[in-house]
Every structure is written in structure tokens, then in C-alpha cells.
Image: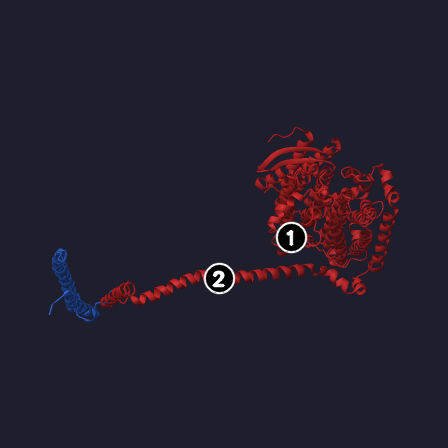
Amino acid sequence: MNVGLEHYLTVSAMLFCLGLLGVILRRNVLVIYMSLELMLNAANLALVAFSRFNENLTGQMMVFFIITVAAAEVAVGLALIVALYRKRQSAHVEDLTSLKL
Amino acid sequence: MEPTSSIAGTTALLVLLLPLLAAIGITLFWKKDEEFSAQLSIGAIALGFALSLGIFAFTGDKAIEANFNWLSVGDLKVSFGLLLDPLSKLMLLVVTGVGLMIHIYSRGYLQGDRSYSRYFASLSLFTFSMLGIVLANNLFMMFVFWELVGVSSYLLIGFWFEKNSAADAAKKAFLTNRIGDFGFILGIILTWLALGSVNFAELAHALEGKAFPFASLTEPLGKIAGGTQWWIVHPNVLVTLVGLLLFMGAMGKSAQFPLHVWLPDAMEGPTPVSALIHAATMVAAGVFMLCRIFFLLNIPGSHALEFIAWIGGFTALLAAVMALQQNDIKRILAYSTLSQLGYMVMAVGLHSPQSAMFHLTTHAAFKALLFLGAGSVIYACHHEQNIWKMGGLSDAMPRTWWTFRWGTLALCGVWPFAGFFSKDAILAAALEHKNIPLFVLGVFVAGLTTFYMSRLVLVAFCGNARSEEASHAHESAGVMTWPLVVLAVPTLLAGAVGIDAYIGKLFPSEHPLHDGGFLENLFAPFNHNIFAASFGLLAVVAGYQLARALYLNADRDRLPEKIGVLAKLARDRFYFDELYEWFISVTQETLARVADWVDRWIIAGLLVRGTHGTTELFGRALRLVQTGSLQTYAFLFAAGVVLVLAWQLLLQSPAH
């Protein structure tokens, strides 16, 4: 079977949707965070696939940037989650509603 | 500010300004010194009277004008100008002469009043304003002083403002006059628009040889009326309209029907004020104004004069009937003033301004005398004004009694008292003008006048005293009785000194009146028009006989039994006050209800609460979206993206 661009894109879309569902439905902040990473990587996959099939390196260059920024983001995000957990003794989103009136 | 150098003009200016200076001086500096403020006020008017006599004696019949530039707005140039012609010179004498007597009298009448100084300041202010009307040489200046007179009248009617009735009467007089003045200023504006001037001499000049002097107003007025021309189809309509608008001013000031309601109430003021303002001078200002602008009313094609004549006649009749059943001595005199003013206005309407001015002059003398006499009676009876609680005063107050009797004889029109000549002139004018209905009306009113005045005299002065106060009454002090004696002189003599001939020079007519000397004048009415004179005297005799039969030694009013419901109507003043009150309350109520509804529902409801309500509704709806849950936001965010994508890809794609 010949693997084409549409297969890659389908996998990428499924990964993205799984990530989105995770972000929307899960209640644990850490899991939500991991789902976010999943969405980022779905995007990465799509970009690499485009790059490969268009014979253009711009997409791959973009992916490197995303991976770098995501690493920094993970560091900051995890630090925030740890700080939040220390303050509230909970990593559950339903306890984190202080933005609500 | 270059005054034309004329001694007469400067003197007239002095006469005008003296009372103003007195009023200012009293108000600012000498309010505490009562005696001095009275003297200052009396001194100002006495000097004014002396100077007026000088002007009268040393200037000829030719009109003298002294102009001082005052203001110019665009095309409208208003000069502060004084005009001295027979009309204003005569009025000058009337105002300062009668005014002087009343100023002196007031010193006695208001003795011990708390606001003695304020009274004299107001009186001087009034004198100043009245002289301003008399001397004004243009309509605009006349209007300014016209309003000033209104203000001082307001101040003086409401002099005892702690009494509610006095304060109300002052307001009523002021507001009723406003209605008339509104028409007056409209008339002035229209005159100025059409003729380009407000100066009397220039106006008269502008009118000469113009067939339709107000025709130039047709177009602008048509524009105001929204292009419809139906109401100004003919230039005559405009001429009449302007005349009637100007007449509205006189209607208010001279208390003509239907604006007559304020004058009887104005009797709430001190009696000398009633004498000066509401009998002798201010209310005559309307008649004076009509004579002054007679050339504007008498334009060929104008029907204003006919209307004026009928309004005057109707007022004379109405007021005389109302006077029949009044019991307050001052109110009887007030209605009689109304009635006599009606005569004067009728005379103007009958193309006879000279007889109007004649009657105005004699009336000023004898009505001031009557009011001051009434004041003396009221003072003696400890402020009792009901004639049925008087009686028998003729013995107690001899000097008041004979002067009052003279005033009554003059008012009724008994030969050789002044009133006979002037009233006869008006009746003769009606005959000359072939206006038989108004002649009959005039004679009938003369009879009524005699009837109610005889009733007043018979009830108040004759018979027995009907109350404690009346039986202890005694003659007033000299400061009050001497003015009566002085005023009694013109009351007797003013009829035959040729006032009508003097004024007649201003109003050229087919039969110029001539002054044939005192003795000839004395019998002139009988030679001139025996009809008018004899009918007038007949009415007097009939009126007196009726009153004598009903009221000699009577202790109660038997008239209501004879004339039934008419008596009640007359006593209640034909319910004009109630009618106006009803009308005003109905219109005001409707207006207030509409305003209230608009305010409550449109402004407060729809605009204010509507805006705030809509904003709040949106706010509340949007608040629900703010759950605070990150995941909801994320979901909405994703849903939004999906929607946009779906819209972009599925609906917008050109393939489908």
C-alpha cells in the first residue's frame, strides 16, 4: 500500500481531535496539559508531512521551532501546575474556578 | 448721546428723571428715614408738576422732539426720545397733578405703616414709568415703560404682600397684562417690519399716501403660516390685524373685556394706589396709547376701530352691571372705572380720540377724588370697606362728604360738573358717527352709573350708622382732606376749559372743535348736540330716581328681589373669574397630563430605562457565558474554529 499525504493528514487530524477532546473533557490539569502537547505534535506531524510531500524544508524548520518553544512552554507550564498544586492541594480543574463571578 | 438742544426737551427729561432719582435715592440711601423719603418722593413729583406747568405754558402747539440715541440692532434704530405735543403735555399735567395730590394724601393714609419708605419708592418708580409712556416718541420705548408700569403696579398691588389676597391679586394683574402685552409687542414688530420705523412721527409720515401700508407683510407672514395664504387674502385684513394686536396692549392695561378681570382684584393695594394707578393714570395708559397711535388704527380699510368701539361699549355695559351688586366701596369704584374706561375706548373706536382724552382727563380728576374719598371713609371706619356697615357718614365727615358728592356728580355726568362734558362728547361722537346702538348703550350705561353711584352714596353716607365703627367715624386729618378739596376744583371746572379743543388740534376732523372761552364752553353741549346732552341728563335723572326709591334709608339691598337672577350674576361678576380659572386649569391640566405621559413613558420609560434595560439584558446574557471554567472556553473556542472552518470550506468552496 502506498502511503500518501492524506494518510499522514488523517493521523494528524485524529491526534489533534484526541488532544482537543482531552483538553475539553478531562478534569486533571496534568492530563489536559499532556493533551495540549498531543495537539502540538499533531500539528508537527502535519507540517512534516507537508514538507515531505511538497519537497520544501520550510515546514520541517517550523517543526524544530515548535519543538523548541514547546520544551520551554512545558517547563513553564509544569512549574505553574506545581505551584498551583501547592497552593490549592488539587490538580482538578473543577476546583480552579476563581475566575468565575 | 447728543441731545438736541431744546430747553423744553431738557425740562421734560428732568420731569421724567426726577421721580426715578427719588426712587433710587430712597431705596439705596434713605430707607430708614421714613419722613425724608416721603418728602423726597413728594418733592420730586411736585417739582415735576411745576416744570410740567412751565412746559404747558411756554411751548406752543407744535410738537417738540428731543432725541437721544439709545440702541441700534441691524435696521432697527431705537432712540430714547421725548415727544412733547398737546397729547403728552396734557397727560403730563394729569399724571403729575393727580399724582402730586395722591402722594400728599398717602403721607396721611399710610402713616405708621412698616414699609412707609418702600411705598414711596414704588410710587416714585411708578410715576417715572408712567411719565415715560407719556413722553415716549416711539413704540419701542413706550413698550419698555409700559412694562415698567406693569412692574410698579405689581409692586404696589402687592404692597401688603403678607396678605395672600394681595399677593395673588398682584400676580393676577401682572399675568393678565402679559397676555395683552404679548399682542402689543407683536403689533409693534409687525408695524416695524412693514413701515421700517417705530417713531410716531416717522410712522405717520410713512403712512401718508400709501394705499396698502402693510401689504409688504403679506409674503413673510405667508411664509410663517406655511405658505397658506388664505388668511391674508386682502391687505385690509393685515391692517386690521396689526391694529387689533396693538389694541391688545390697551386691552390689558386699560382692563377691557375680556382682560378686565384683574382690575377689581387690584383693589387689594392701598387705596391711594388704587386712586393713582388703577383709576387715574395707569389704566388710562391704554387709552392714551390708542390716541397716540390713532393714525395706525384709522388707516382706510382697517376695521380695527369698529371692533375697538364695540369692545369698549361692551366693557362699559358689563362693568356697570357688575357694579350694581357690589358691596365693597372700592370694588364699586373699580367697576365704575372699568365702565368709564370702556367709554373712553369706545370713544376712540368712534373716531373721536379727543373726547376719549377729554374723558380720560376729567375722569382722572374725579375718580382720583372718589378713590381718595373712599380711602378717607375706609380710614375713618377702621378699614371697613362694606358700604352696608357704614351709613350716616355725611355728618361725621363733612369735608369728605361734599368732595365725594362732587366726584359722584361728575362721574354721573351732571351739568356743570366735568364728567358731563366729557361723557356728552362721547355720546355726541356716537351720534355723529350714526352708531345708534352704541349711543343707546352709552345712555343706558350712564343711567346705570348714576344708579350704582347713588346707591353707594345713599347707603354709605346717608341714613343711620349701621355699625359700631361707622357711628364713631370722624373726619380724617388735613393731609388727607386737602388733596380732596384740591381735586374737587378740576372735578367741577375741567369740563369747560376746552380740553377737547386742545387735543382736537392733533386729530383733524370735518368739524374742528373750537375753544370759545369758559362761558361758551359751559353751554356748548346743548348748542352742539342737544340730543346727546338731553338723553344723557335724562339717564342721570332716571338712574337717581330709581336708586332713591330703592336705597333711601334702606337697611338692606332690595334690588335682588326686583331683578332676580341678574343680581346674583352681577354679584358673582358673571363668573368670568371662575370661567378663566376653569379654562386655565383645564388647559394646564391637559398640558400637564400630556407632559407627564411623555416624561413618564417616552423619556423616562423608553429612552432612559430602555437604554439601561437593553444594556443590562445583554450584560446579563453575556455573564452566563463567563463560566470561569477553562474547558468550556476551550470548547467554545474549538467549536468556533470548527464553525468557521465548516463555513469556509463547505459553503464557500467554489467546487459545490
Q: Colour of chain B?
A: red
What is the three-letter code of the residue carrying label 2?
Ile
Q: Residue A47: x, y in percent?
A: 15, 60
In the image, are marks 1 and 2 on the same chain? yes
Q: Residue B532: x, y in percent?
A: 85, 48
Q: Which chain is blue?
A: A
In the image, B343 versus B203, the foreground residue is B203
Instruction: Say above or below: B639 vs B455.
Output: below
Name the side, left or right, on which B87 lies relative to A89: right
Residue named by callout 1: B176
Quadrant where the C terminus of chain B lies? bottom left
Name the side, left or right, on which B552 lies relative to B629: right
Q: Residue B184: x, y in percent?
A: 65, 47
Q: Secondary structure at mark 1?
A: helix
**Which subunit holds the residue at mark 2?**
B
Tag 2 or tag 1, which sits nearer the N-term?
1
Extreme residue toward the top, this view: B5
Say how the picture is coloured.
by chain
**Which subunit holds the residue at mark 1?**
B
In the image, B188 versus B518, the foreground residue is B188
In the image, B257 versus B40, the foreground residue is B257
Instruction: Give the numbered dot on residue B602.
Output: 2
